[in-house]
């Protein structure tokens, strides 16, 4: 009985001290791109609505390159429709997208999601189930995930876009759920200055 109580107490201690890590599906092989490094010009695949294509300033059919997105800042969220943390984060992501728009920054800041290991069909299921208001791309063969460091989900990259230098620079990262959409957005904008 005493060993069982000690085991339970230890489990609760570990659970409480690792709370942020418990809000993400981590990957043991993960090696995220560090802040300050260059993001590869990712090939983004998937079906987008005409509204999302226009919102991102894209032309033509898929696939598209990350560098084609017309914005000063791109917030890229790696998610999976099978990740319970991503499912719980979906309303907060819609809130983040609404916050970008309500602050009048929709022309300069774009939020996109990439469904890690998810087909177009799986991304569409996620889009429909959580009524996502921002563009979602698919990554069925984990190509994008390999290029961004085989990250766990959800994983956020805040990217500064510099078309003149043809650079996309990582200015902030986050593994796991946001504390709040507003706090994350304020931190992201400060990091991009």
Image (cartoon, rainbow, N blue to C red):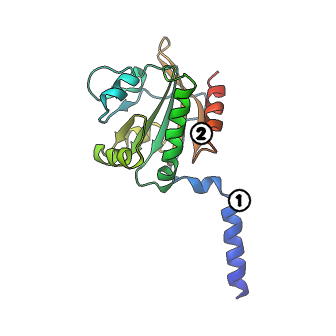
Label of residue 17 in the image: 1
- Residue pictured at 31% horizontal, 46% vertical: 119
Rendering coords of residue 127 (x, y %): 37, 44
Query: Which one is nearer the viewer's eye here, 190 or 13?
Result: 190
Q: What residue do we see at 42% from left, 22% from top?
A: 69
Query: Can residue 38 be seen here?
Result: no
Judge left or right: residue 82 versus residue 109. left
Q: Quadrant of residue 158?
A: top right
Q: Dividing the image into 4 quarters, which one contains the C terminus?
A: top right
Q: How many marks?
A: 2
The residue lying toward the viewer, choosing from 120 and 130, is 130
Q: Is 27 above or below relative to 56?
A: below
| Residue that appears at 36% across and 37% down | 137
Q: Residue at x 29, y 43 (%)?
A: 120
**On the image, which quarter does residue 181 sit in?**
top right
Asked if residue 133 is positioned above or below residue 81 in the image, the reply reads above
| Residue 157 x %, y % | 54, 35
Find residue 48 and report its image quarter: top left
Where residue 110 appears, as percent x and y from the top left, is 48, 27
How crowded is the residue under tag 2: few (<14 C-alpha within 10 Å), some, or many (20+)?
Answer: many
Q: Residue furthest top?
A: 164
- How far, Cα to Cα, is label 2 from label 1? 23 Å
Left or right, 34 with respect to 48, comes to right
Check residue 181 in the rendering and tell me which mark sits there, or answer none: 2
């Amino acid at each position: 009985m005493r060993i069982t109580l000690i085991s339970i107490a230890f489990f609760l201690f570990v659970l409480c001290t690792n709370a942020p890590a418990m809000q993400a599906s981590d990957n043991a092989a993960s090696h995220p791109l560090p802040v300050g490094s260059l993001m590869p010009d990712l090939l983004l695949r998937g079906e987008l609505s005409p509204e999302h294509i226009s919102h991102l300033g894209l032309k033509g059919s898929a696939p598209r390159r990350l560098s084609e997105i017309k914005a000063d800042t791109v917030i890229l969220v790696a998610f999976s429709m099978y990740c319970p943390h991503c499912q719980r984060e979906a309303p907060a992501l819609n809130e983040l997208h609404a916050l970008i728009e309500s602050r009048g920054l929709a022309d300069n800041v774009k939020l996109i999601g990439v469904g890690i290991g998810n087909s177009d069909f799986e991304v569409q299921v996620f889009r429909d189930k959580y009524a996502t208001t921002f563009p979602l791309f698919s990554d069925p063969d984990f190509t994008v995930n390999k290029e961004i460091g085989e990250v766990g989900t959800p994983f956020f990259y805040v990217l500064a876009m510099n078309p003149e230098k043809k650079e996309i620079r990582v200015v902030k990262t986050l593994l796991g759920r946001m504390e709040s959409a507003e706090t994350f957005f304020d931190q992201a904008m400060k990091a991009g200055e």
